[in-house]
Every structure is written in C-alpha cells, then in structure tokens.
Image (cartoon, helix red, strand yellow):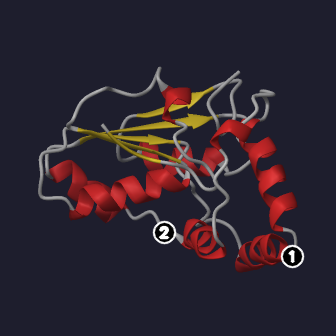
Amino acid sequence: MRYFSGFSLQAEQSLFSDCLINSEYCVAGFSYGAQQALEYVLASSTRIDRLILLSPAFFQTQKTSFIRAQLRYFEAEQDAYVEQFLKNAASPSTYMLDAYLNVGTKEELEALLTYQWESAKIQEVLSKGTVIEVFLGAEDKIIDAQEAFLFFKALTPTYFIKGVGHLLKT
C-alpha cells in the first residue's frame, strides 16, 4: 500500500488499520495526505484498485480570512500552532500523536488550506476503475465534516462516523 501522511505527521498509518487494506494496489492518505493521495492516483499510470481518503483536508468552504489567519498563526508560533493542531486532530479522544510528529512547513500548510477538491478529479479516478472510499469523523475539529460529507457522498461511498474526530478514534 502507498500511504500519504497528514500535515506535521509521519508514519501514522497504523492508527487507521481498521480502514486500510494491505495491498500493493491500494493508495491511502490522511488529511493533507488524502489530497496528495488523490493527486498521486490521478498522475499514476499503474494499476490502483482502491483509494482510501481518511478525514480528507477540506477547507474550500472557508473564507480567505480564515486561511490567512491560520498561516499567520503558524508563522508567529509554529510550535504552539502544531501542538494545538495535533490536539484538535485527536479530539474528542485524548490520543497523543507525539510519536508521529514531523513538523510541516508553511508551504505545506498553505497547500493544505487552499486545495480545491473537484468532482471532475474524483470522476476521473473512478473512470480508471479505482474504487474510492472516504472516512469522516462527525466530531471533527479540523475540518467542517458536514460540508465534506455533502461533497463526497454525491460522488463515492462516504462513511460519516459518529463520536469520532479527525483522527477517527474514540
């Protein structure tokens, strides 16, 4: 399986073992990594049977002022920003993500916040014969999970899991 990590994380795929498929024909990504996973599958000419998007970073319904504020906060207090980001990602669980910490860059954060999910890209992946599954936590404190659910459910199987947040853990 090819896996893409979330912002400021590395090697966290073991946290999602319930959702992942151990196959050389599977691509998966968490949050920011979900964006990268989609782009990888779009550009790939190799066989990919399944694309798994775990809490895909979905900010296209946010105002530009929100994005600017996030970038300013990251620049001013990078350590504090990442610490709060990881707490919010884990919430409502108290799971500690310190073991997976790999502080991201401002450029990565900006790419994450400004990425536009497009239904045409999803359709292109589906037309290649790739199955797409999306997993979202109803209590997500990072993204607007309801807006993400409305976007993805019209295109592909989307699981809206009650009682979990961005990390999909209780």
- As drawn, is 20 to the left or to the right of 41? right
Label 2 vs label 1, nearer the camera: 1
Q: Is residue 120 above or below residue 86?
A: below
Q: Which mark is residue 76?
A: 1
The quadrant where residue 90 appears: top right
Q: Is residue 64 above or below residue 156?
A: below
At a point 82% along the width and 51% down the height, the residue shown is 83
Q: Nearer the viewer, residue 77 or 67?
A: 77
Q: Which mark is residue 20?
A: none
Q: Is residue 111 above or below residue 82?
A: below
Q: How many marks can you see?
A: 2
Q: Is residue 63 above or below residue 98?
A: below
At a point 64% along the width and 35% down the height, the residue shown is 167
* Amino acid type at image mark 1: Ala
**Local crowd size for mark 2, using a 10 Å CA cut-off: few (<14), some (14–19), many (≥20):** some
Q: In x, y percent, where is residue 135?
A: 50, 35
Q: In x, y percent, where is residue 128?
A: 14, 51
Q: In x, y percent, where is residue 155?
A: 35, 47
- As drawn, is 168 to the left or to the right of 64? left
At a point 30% along the width and 59% down the height, the residue shown is 40
The quadrant where residue 158 appears: top left
Q: Quadrant of the N terminus?
A: top left
Q: In x, y percent, where is residue 133?
A: 37, 37
Q: Quadrant of the C terminus?
A: top right
Q: Which mark is residue 116?
A: 2
**Local crowd size for mark 1, using a 10 Å CA cut-off: few (<14), some (14–19), many (≥20):** few
User: Which is nearer the N-term, disc 2 or disc 1?
Assistant: 1
Q: Nearer the viewer, residue 113 or 21?
A: 21
At a point 77% along the width and 56% down the height, the residue shown is 82
Alpha carbon separation for disc pair 2 and 1 = 26 Å
* Amino acid type at image mark 2: Gln
SS state under label 1: helix
